[in-house]
Each structure stands twice: as structure tokens, then as C-alpha cells.
Amino acid sequence: MGREKLQSAAPGQAKRLRREARAEKAQRAETRSMETQPKERPPLSIKLKLTLWFTAFMAILAAACLGIILLISQSVARNEARQVLTLSVRANIPEVSLENGRLTLSPDFNFYTNNVSMLLYNQDMALLSGQVPPSFPVNTPAENGAFRLVDDGNDGYYILDFWIPSGWEDGVWLRGVLANPGGSQSVGNIFAIFSIVLPFLILAAALGGYWIVKGALAPISRIAETAETISGGQDLTSRIGVPGRGSGSLEVNRLASAFDHMFERLEQSFEAEKQFTSDASHELRTPVSVILAQCNFVEKHGDGLEDYQEAIQVIDRQAKNMSLLIERLLDMTRLDLGTQKLRVERVNLSEMCAVLCEEQDTGTRGISIFPEIEDGITVSGDQLLLARVIGNLLDNARKYGKENGHIFLRLYRRQDLAVLEVEDDGIGIRPEKLEKIWQRFYQADDARGSGSGLGLGLSMVRQIVKLHGGDVSVESAAGKGSRFTVVLALDQAG
């Protein structure tokens, strides 16, 4: 059927059908290959690997200890046998005598003492007296003073021989025989003890190793869980939390702390981005609407050059406002993220205040600036940012001051602090609005609307002062004016 379809199709269509058939065949072959390919086993977790390694190590260590104990026990048994045999045989030597070929034993002679059997042989190794232990080879040759282990097919016997002479040619052999104390019974006892203790030892090692590894790797699990939570966008405030002293390890705790700092920076970045997007979308809506309205009006109702010029002026003014707003928002975002680093230098705050008062005392709305500046006050900080603080406070006092009013700028020392006060006699701020003036885009004077500014000046003042480790506060009364106070640490070198 497929071949008839190819034959009846046009040449171009036939080529396309053949390509599709080859692709489908290749796809089926790949699917069969993937189905027949053995599935890979999931890798073991680090926790399980370390636990198994620790358990195996303890098992090997226990086996090594068993071998060492066996060697030590054999050595101890041999030394003990040598000592017992030597003492026992030597104690019986004075009790043996041979007179005229006749063996005589004193009443103090002991045939069995300290588990040692005493045997007496003539010089031809014929047994004269004594009871031979079971399975001991009687015809074992004698060696004077030699301590030896004789194999009897089982555990063996330790023997010690001494030649007791009588005259030049005659005498007897005194032999002490002691069953091997380190034989199979002793070894069996040691193995029996280990067979009982070793499983508990390995189990305790496995449980202890697992508990240690679990405690040490717990922060890593929390790191993974927290990272998954943050990567899923579920909760940017999640933190791992550095364990208390005694839990985990120093390296893992440092890793957890580093991740917490990284997550904190990520949260700050997201919050700054969200704040910037929110602020920009909120504040750009009005100028964009004005620009679009002017364009639409000119397009539909513009009759002459005057209408176009007026529209261009409005658009130009709104575009400049938008540019200024974006610049201020970017500055504040950089301060939030810490990407705008402080160029710390020695700043003569007295000279800066004098210059700025002179530059801004333009007599706008009849307002005059009266500086009271103490000489030689220096601080450490960013000169441009500190100048913006003073400029914003003077600009704010001028905007909200009354017609033909006054602005008082005071700079003085207070112990090891530099205190800057900017006071006006303008409209003041109602008590319920004092904390809100530091918020972005908030303007205490609702009557002036957008014409009074962007509402970013005081928020930026607070950011810059905090960045310099200082503090800013306000005192105000409605209808009587406001006084802003900035406190910074004096430059000690100055």
C-alpha cells in the first residue's frame, strides 16, 4: 500500500514521503534502542557511601585487632609456658639422684605440678618413671635445656629437657611436659568472644557513623532544599541557618553561612528589581500619558506652528522629568544593592556646606539661607553623595518653605560627632506623616502635587546617611516649619 502510494505521488511529494518514512523508521529504531538499553542505577547518596565506608573500615579494624590479639595471646602463652616449665623442672632437679645405676627420688619430687607432667628417661630415652600425657609422642628426642613445641597432631605440647649426670657416663633425662595453653581452645574462646562482641561493635559503628555523617551533612541537605525553594520562586526569604556549636562541621557551617549570604543578596536583588519596576511603572505612567495625550491632540486638532511648539515643549518637559526620575531610581537601586561603592575620602564638611549654601542662595520665592558653620569639621565618606545629602535637604527646605521665608543651616561638633541641621519656617509636617516622608514618592504637601518634586529626595538622604554609618531625624510642627538633623562620625585624623 505504501509503495503504491509512493508510485502514484508526484516526484516532489514522493521524495517528501520517503524522507518522512526514513525519519519514522529511525525514530522507531531509536525508541527500541532506548527500551533495550539497561537503565542506570541511581547513584548512592554521600551519606550512605560514608556510612558504608565507615562500617567497612571498622569491620577491617576489628579483624585486624582480632589478629593482633591472637598473635599476642600466642606470644603470651609461649612465654608463660616457658616460665612455668623452667620453674617446675628446675625445682625437681635436686630431688633426683642415680646411685650405682639405681634411680632414687626424694619425697619432695612432684610428678605433676602447675599442669606440668614430669617424665624421667635414661640416656637411651627409655621411660623410667612418670605418666605420659595423652597423645604425647614418647620417643621425642631430648635436647638439654631446649624449650620446644612438640606436635602431637592437635595443639601440641611444650617440653623442656635437662640432663642430670651421674658420674662420667651415666645419668637420667628429666623432662617437663605442658599442654599448649595457646591452643585451639584458647583461640576458640577468643573467637567466641569476638563473635558476640563484633556484631554489636559493627552495628554501633554503623549507627554512630550514620549519626555523625547525618549531622555533618544536614546543612548540605538544607542548602539543597532552600536552593530548590528559591529557584522555584516560592520563598525568597528562606534561609539555611548556621547550626549551633557542636553540630555539623566547621567547613559545612561556613558553606551554609556563605549560602545564606548569597540568598540574602539574591533576595535584595529581587526586591530591588521589584521595587524599581513598581516605582518606574507607577511614576512613568503620568508623563507617558501626558506625552501620548499631547501627540494625540496635535495629530487631531493641531492647526498651526504655535500648537506644535506648545506640544513639543510639554513633551520635552515630561521627557526630562522621566529622564531625571529614571536616573534617581537607578541611583537608589544601586545604593540598595551596594553596587555603588563609597569612594571614601576625607571630606571637609564645613567648606562643602559653605559652598552649597552660596550656590543655592538664589533668592527663589524670596527665601534666604543663613549658614552657621563651625570651621574645620571633617568626616570620612563619599564627597559626591554627602553633597547630595546637603543639596537635597536645602532643596526640600526651599520647596516647602513659605514665601520670603528663611532657611537655617547649622554645622557643629558634638563630642566625636558632626551634627548638621537644616531648618525652615515653612508649612511643616503633621505628626501622622513624619514617618512617611522617608518613603519613596511620598510628598507631605498634597496641595502642591507633582509640581513639588519626585518625592525621592528624603528617601535618598536617608539611604546615603545610613550608608555612611550615620543617622538622620526630623522634628516638625504643622505651620511652623521643619528641622532635619544629620549625625555623622568625625574624621579622627582631621
Image (cartoon, helix red, strand yellow):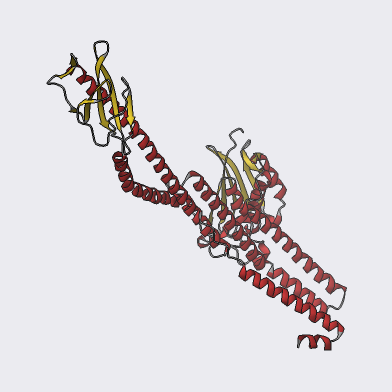
- Residue at (58%, 60%) from the top-left corner? 439
What x and y, as percent, mark residue 240? 49, 55
Which quarter shows the N terminus?
bottom right
Observer-nearest residue: 422 or 50? 50
Name the outermost residue toward the left.
Answer: 107
Residue toward you, 146 or 137: 137
Q: Establish if 289 lies above or below 237.
A: below
Residue 472 can be seen in this image = no
Q: Is residue 332 left or right of residue 102?
A: right
Count the marks.
0
Name the image quarter holding the C terminus: top right
Residue at position x 18%, y 27% in the image: 111
Q: Nearer the viewer, residue 446 or 160?
A: 160
Residue ranking furthest to the top: 168
Q: Position of residue 437 (x, y in %)?
A: 57, 59
Q: Is residue 106 above or below residue 52?
A: above
Q: Is residue 287 left or right of residue 123?
A: right
Residue occupying image coordinates x 61% and y 71%? 35
Horizontal arrangement in the rendering, residue 29 relative to residue 302 (left or right): left
Percent of width and height locating residue 390: 64, 48
